[in-house]
Image (tube, helix red, strand yellow):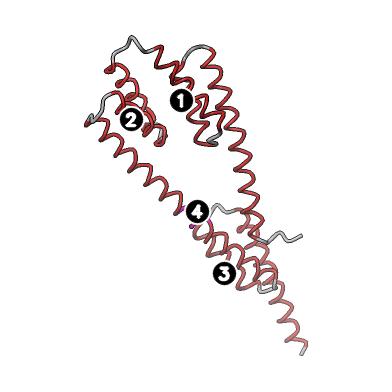
Amino acid sequence: MQPNDPRLSVLLDKINRMEQEELEYKEWMTKGKTEEDSKNYQEAITMYEKAKLLKSTSEVVSKIESIRALLDQANAENTKATIYQQYLDAGIANVNSKEYELAINNFRNALNAKPNDATALTKIAEAESLLEKLREQSKQKAESDLAFNKMVAEADELFNNNNYQKAAEAYRNILAIKPEHAYSKRQLTEAERLNKQESIALANQQYQK
């Protein structure tokens, strides 16, 4: 009914993200249950932690707490140094895969096994810094996308008001930012065609006059 209303796309994107998060949450919970049944407790915690990042439900929190208890029991005979190294290695792997929140959790677990450890403290600080940079980049991208969508909406408004010359200029400005934007390419072609058609009609009108 109103295809050019930019709010609708934002809301649809939000719904799609929510549905995707729900699907991913269930997938991580299923993987966690599989690892738990196989008594791979550390892997199970990792799976449940990923689910928790999406939805911090009482179910997943309870799972993590209960498995941590099982993990502590299973590792009762291991030394704290071994536990520390396991968490540290897991955190380093998380950083390499850009899973910074999981990395921070694992480094903090390492710190719990070895309080005041300089390496763990440094790793936590590094992961927190990387996470902050990632969030800032996401924020900037969201702002950039919002500004871009506003440009498209303004160009569409010019087009819908039959101001084809200015609409064509607006679409060219958009394509200067995103040359691969297929919608603006189509709109530019149509705006140029209609503008040319109007120019011919005007010239003919002047001729007849």
- In the rendered structure, which disc, 4 or 3, sits on the residue that comes first in sequence? 4
Alpha carbons under labels 4 and 3: distance apart:
25 Å
The residue wearing badge 1 is: 46
Q: Residue at x 56, y 19 (%)?
A: 33
- Per the rendering, the mark at residue 107 is 2
Tag 4 secondary structure? helix
The residue wearing badge 4 is: 142
Range covered by the magenta-colored residues: 140-145
Alpha carbons under labels 1 and 3: distance apart:
51 Å
Quadrant of the rendering where the C terminus is positioned? bottom right
The residue wearing badge 3 is: 169
Query: Left or right of 39: which side holds 85?
Result: left
Tag 2 secondary structure? helix
Q: Nearer the viewer, residue 7 or 113?
A: 113
Q: Amino acid at mark 4?
A: Ala
Closer to the camera: disc 2 or disc 3? 2
Crowding around mark 3 (Cα neighbors within 10 Å: few <14, some 14 to 19, many 20+) is: some
Tag 1 secondary structure? helix
Q: Residue at x 26, y 34 (%)?
A: 121
